[in-house]
Amino acid sequence: MASANLNIMIKAARKAGRSLVKDFREVENLQVSVKGAGDFVSRADREAERIIKEELRTARPNYGWIGEETGEEAGEDPTRRWIVDPLDGTTNFLHGLPHWAVSIALEHKGEIVAAVVFDAAKDEMFTAERGDGAFLNDRRIRVSGRRQMIESIFATGVPFGGRGTLPATIRDLSRLMPVTAGVRRWGAAALDLAYVACGRFDGYWERGINSWDVAAGILLVKEAGGFVEPIRSEESVIESGNIIAANAQLFEGFAEIIRSRD
Ligand code: IPD
Ligand code: CA
């Protein structure tokens, strides 16, 4: 049984998802003018955040808020806040690639307690609550059972647009590619983690990611039986933005490779 808070989150994600699906169909028609498509997508993104904020704040007016588009707002209740990415995978959306999602997490006293990642284009709703397991469209999900790195697939985000984490990521890739079944860069961190949670990917890591990209996905992986840690053990994942996630059997070997120069 989903809690009242999770039901509120699911409703908000579905409503924003409907608006995004409508806008996604338009994007194809706008590809002739790149700037036109870019402006249109940022409007779609802002509208999705507006919808989610309205739903969540109407239902829980005293909770705090952090959203990719509107930033941070303290709530009367300092122990609870929503962490929201209305459109994770913006570049995919802009290019007409159907791989993007709405991500909503609820944090309580610094811990993520409820999570929703909604892939509206494929109608896949990933949900989790702390202690209650993780679900895809109401069916229980678990991380993969693979034990061998050479049979396993790992997802990541390769930094773009001149981001400083590129050399470290290239070193990661050169170490991982020879000893795994491959690396995927699909462009939506929330879905990378959701896919680890349901066993499609065996692990995920990324450097310099924002809290709203991964907050919900972290709980999905943990509740599906996987491990999530920061790259440097003394840091926090949410604050440092450096994250490693994998099934329990692969985690140690995978983390050793990613951490080897840190
Ligand atoms: C991005 C995606 C991408 C990740 C980037 C994020 P956005 O979010 O999650 O996979 O590699 O670090 O910024 O911009 O599409 O919301
Ligand atoms: Ca994002």
Image: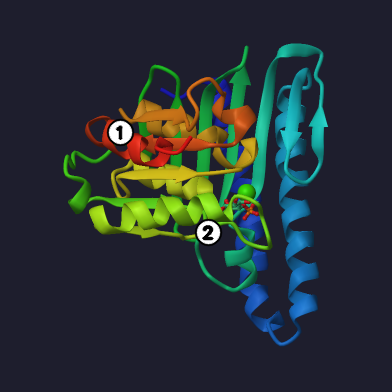
Q: Looking at the image, which residue is at 71% across and 87% down? A: 32
Q: In this rendering, would 257 be left or right of 65?
A: left
Q: Position of residue 35 (x, y in %)?
A: 79, 77
Residue of label 1:
251
Amino acid under disc 2:
Gly
Q: Examine the image and state in which quarter residue 20 appears.
A: bottom right
Percent coordinates x, y for residue 167 in the rendering:
55, 55
**The disc label shown at residue 182, or none:** none
Find out if the beta carbon at label 2 lies less than 8 Å from the nearest ligand 1 atom: yes
> Residue 92 lies in what quarter of the image?
bottom right
Question: Marks 2/1: CA distance?
Answer: 22 Å
User: Going 79% across and 77% down the picture, which residue do you hit?
Assistant: 36
The local secondary structure at tag 1 comes to: helix
Query: Of helix, strand and loop, which one carries label 2?
Result: loop
Tell me if residue 138 can be seen.
no
Q: Residue at x 17, y 39 (%)?
A: 147
The answer to which of 61 and 254 lies nearer the viewer is 254
Total numbered labels placed on residues in the image: 2
Query: As shown in the figure, which amino acid type bears the numbered disc 1?
Result: Phe
Q: Is residue 15 left or right of residue 63?
A: left
**Image point (74%, 32%), residue name:** 66
Q: Is residue 203 left or right of residue 34?
A: left
- Position above or below: 75 against 210: above
- Which label belongs to residue 187? 2
Decide: few, some or many residues near mark 1? Use Cα within 10 Å; few <14, some 14-19, many ≥20.
Answer: many
Instruction: Residue 1: give x, y in percent of width and height.
Output: 41, 22
Image position of 198 with respect to 156: above or below: above
Q: Tell which of 228 and 144 is nearer to you.
A: 228
Among the 4 quarters of the image, the one containing residue 239: top right
